[in-house]
Amino acid sequence: MLPDHSACYDALLAHDPRFDGRFYVGVTSTRIYCRPVCRARTPKRKNCRFFSNAAAAEAAGFRPCMRCRPELAPGWGPVDAGIRIAAAAALLIEAGEVESGGMTELAVRLGVTDRHLRRVFRAEFGVSPVEYAQTQRLLMAKRLLADTTLPVTQVALAAGFSSLRRFNAAMRTHYGLSPNELRRTAASRTKRDEELRFELGYRPPFDWERLLAFLDKRSIAGVECVTDGSWARTLRLEHRGKVLTGWVRVSHIPDRCSLSVEVATQLLPALPAVLGGVRQVFDLGCDPHAVTDALGELAVGAPGLRVPGAIDGFEMAVRAILGQQITVKAAHTIAGRFAKAMGESVAAPWDELHLVFPTPNTVAAATPESIASLGIVRQRANALLALAREMNAGRLDLSPAADVEETQRRLCDLPGIGPWTAQYIALRALSWPDAWPSGDIALMKALGTSKPREADVAAEQWRPWRSYATLHLWRRLSEDES
């Protein structure tokens, strides 16, 4: 929900970063829309119109600001069940997953009719899914024109336009500039890079060090690593019938409240999906003040703690199964062994990265004996095979767009996957902010009880942010024991 006009204007006056990405201001005298953190001269109150998202501002005839660049604003993390369908659709649109199948396929994936999707989407965002998708394409193109030296034709294709003619027409219609004119305008404000390097914003505070340490301990050798204060990993993506492999590296720019994302050029066609995956891993949609207000004393000492997400739901689910009832260190070793035996080689600028994680199809073709030979107990080997076969058959979706309750049920129906594993997968792969791995020994210890039921009752106070409560309890226990 959009704050009232007065609250929005007060946030604009203060350039309050807590509201960045929560609303945009359209200035009627210039027909330009900005983020609330924009450092341009503050417009008069009477000239301001406020919008909950960039698409709504553009649908009202406003153009994006060249100075604050609305495409760099952080996203948002919805939790209310009533907006999950609209939110899931937005995530998929932002990741570029509708370019091949269109809105009909999007509705099918979400388990609703086209009409229902349009209705709930407009109710939540104030525009149609088609209008929202067009805005995302244009903002991605604007980002590429401003930040890279890519030819305009490559920009058009990477942003999701089917032809250069359509791209040029859309730019003229929405922004009143040709792509080359926009690039020249942006050049006076932005230094373009020969490499694919982008920024993704967040709302402070942001506990980069703890998040990086969490990812480092749970990394899969050969697939991901933390080096020189940055997180890097390999990727394998399917895009319009083609398999793309490459790498991504993420580092922190604290004075700009953003992350720097460097992407291998091989992944350019799937750039929206790559950036969307990074947003999930680093929980960039989080509103830390809303979370800390809800958690109270539990969040003291680490108000910017985020819930680490996943860029590959299958990989995360495999990692969760391998980590059942063993230490984090032991799970790290076994996961690396699994990736080495079943993954594929890929080139990357770092010696630590040389594998892409195996696909569901590869794992589904394995035998229980071959998996068990890697030091994995037979029960978990069977669980991995069952998971891979469900994923390979398309019966299981482990992305943030998935229906949480249905996915939980499907996971628990598989052999070797219980509620704890299903909740952990929801926490990380589905980016569900209210997951609670009931029965977790560390959580019970942090809460001073040995009874799962007592821990579950204690956690009720933290709804709908129990995923964040989980991370804080793990943090507290770890810091108390160190």
Image (tube, rainbow, N blue to C red):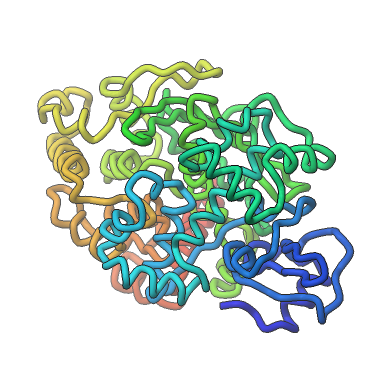
Q: Which of the 4 image quadrants contains residue 106?
A: bottom left
In the displayed structure, does residue 264 sit left or right of residue 209? left
Residue 415's place in the image compared with 369, above or below, is below
In the displayed structure, does residue 13 sit left or right of residue 149? right
Q: Nearer the viewer, residue 177 or 34?
A: 177
In the displayed structure, does residue 174 sit left or right of residue 325? right
Is residue 448 visible to the viewer in this orientation of the structure? Answer: no
Residue 120's place in the image compared with 270, above or below, is below
Residue 372 position in % (x across, y down): 16, 28
Residue 7 position in % (x across, y down): 73, 81
In the displayed structure, does residue 477 sit left or right of residue 145? left
Q: Which of the 4 image quadrants contains residue 188?
A: top right
| Residue positioned 68% across, 55% down in the render | 70
Q: Nearer the viewer, residue 33 or 209?
A: 33
Is residue 474 visible to the viewer in this orientation of the structure? Answer: yes
Q: Quadrant of the N terminus?
A: bottom right
Residue 333 position in % (x across, y down): 36, 28
| Residue positioned 35% across, 57% down in the render | 103
Residue 235 position in % (x across, y down): 43, 31
| Residue positioned 28% across, 40% down in the render | 318
| Residue positioned 57% across, 63% down in the render | 55
- How many dots with numbers? 0
